[in-house]
Image (cartoon, rainbow, N blue to C red):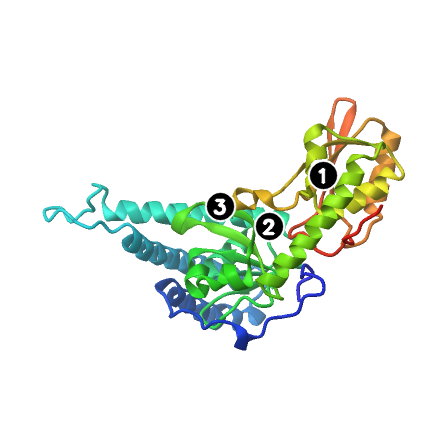
Amino acid sequence: MPSCAVLGVGWLTRDSLPPPPPPSWPRVIATTLRLWVQRHVIGARPSAPAGGRPYRLVAGVVAIAAVAGSATALVIAKGSDAPSATPASTGEPATGAPSSTLSSQALAAANASRQQAAAWVATQVSHGVIVGCDPLMCAALQQHGFPPADLATLGASASDPLGAGIVMSTLAVRSQLGTSLASVYAPLVIASFGAGSSLVQVRVETPGGAASYVSAGRADLVARQTAGRELAANKNIDAPATARAELVSGRVDSRLLITMAALAARFRLRIDAFGDGGPGDGASAPLRQLAIVTSSATYLHQLLAFLGAQRPPLLAIVSEHRRGRTTTVHVQFTAPSLFGLLPASTTQ
């Protein structure tokens, strides 16, 4: 069970879920890749010497993944871009672009979205949260440094993403899970990259089902709005109008709100901005980063000491950025945001 699961929400049972759609070409390709990995990589890994065969095997996996991606993109391009009429003399699409060019463009777009999503997840998602992904997406995540032990491959043998905290919604995963991906398993998008067949969404998996998650999300929003209004009115907090509006509207992550309340009881806070809401469709997700401006070495030392003394889930990633005589401290919490940390009737 990943650490990011919604508090107080139970698991779905497999018998209550709709049957999966029939296998698609991307799913067949994923099955072939998974079987190759099981036979040639997993089985060979214990006996491989350091710096030896595993690197050659990884290179083989990457090569096969590239072939699988090419075949998947070709099927997508032929299925979605096929014209209603083709000139008999050339055999090219009515648009005038050769089919090889269209498939190459689709492959390049899919790879770009995959790499962008992998880079974002590797830096924004907690290492410890299980991420469900198709083989190509899992390979990209590993390349960007996400721990292999925290990846769950959604291949032909996996009929659902239960057990994952994050689901990478690629074309292969959407083809496998159909509409149940958004309606049952993972309704919340916290980031998205690309469009059309190359779209990659970072979705939060909901163990208790979409209805329970939406209900918990609404309750948490009310709690964040209540806490945010009080912090916006706190005379020990100096923040620009945009940041105050984000506090009042409930846009700020509850872990940041708790941290700000504790800091404001000790120090005078000069807030620069909130950030890291997620690109694309994830722009409405809670803001998980806070920039605090400090003007003295003593204040900076005390602030860093306080932040470093916290424990999960309130232990943040802290970085410093010096500009002239001031140092801005960035306090960032990983995705996804947690529900239930604040009571609905916050009175702090």
Q: Earlier in the sequence, mark 1 or mark 3?
A: 3
For image coordinates 47% across by 73% down, the residue present is 157
324 or 330: nearer the viewer: 330
Which mark lies nearer to you, 1 or 3? Answer: 1
Specify the label residue 193 is tagged with: 3
- Residue 123 appears in the figure: yes
Residue at 58%, 74% in the rendered image: 13
Residue at 66% across, 67% down: 1
Tell me the residue that label 1 is attached to: 248
Q: Position of residue 332 (x, y in %)?
A: 71, 43
> What is the residue that sits farthest to the bottom in this orientation?
15
Please tell me how crowded label 2 is: few (under 14), some (14-19), or many (20+) other residues with Cα within 10 Å. some
Q: Are marks 2 and 3 in contact (CB under 8 Å)?
A: no
Q: Which numbered disc flags the more N-terminal residue, 2 or 1?
A: 2
Residue 110's place in the image compared with 181, above or below, is: above
Q: How many numbered tags mark residues here?
A: 3
10 Å crowding of disc 1: few (<14), some (14-19), many (20+): some
x, y percentage for residue 154? Answer: 50, 65
Question: In this figure, which residue is indicated by the disc labeled 2?
Answer: 122
At label 3, the amino acid type is: Phe
Secondary structure beneath label 3: strand
Q: Position of residue 28 (x, y in %)?
A: 38, 67
In this view, 216 is above or below 198: below
Residue 328 to residue 221: above or below: above
Q: Amino acid at mark 2?
A: Ala
Label 2 and label 1: CA atoms lie apart by 30 Å
Mark 3: few, some, or many residues within 10 Å (few <14, many ≥20)?
many
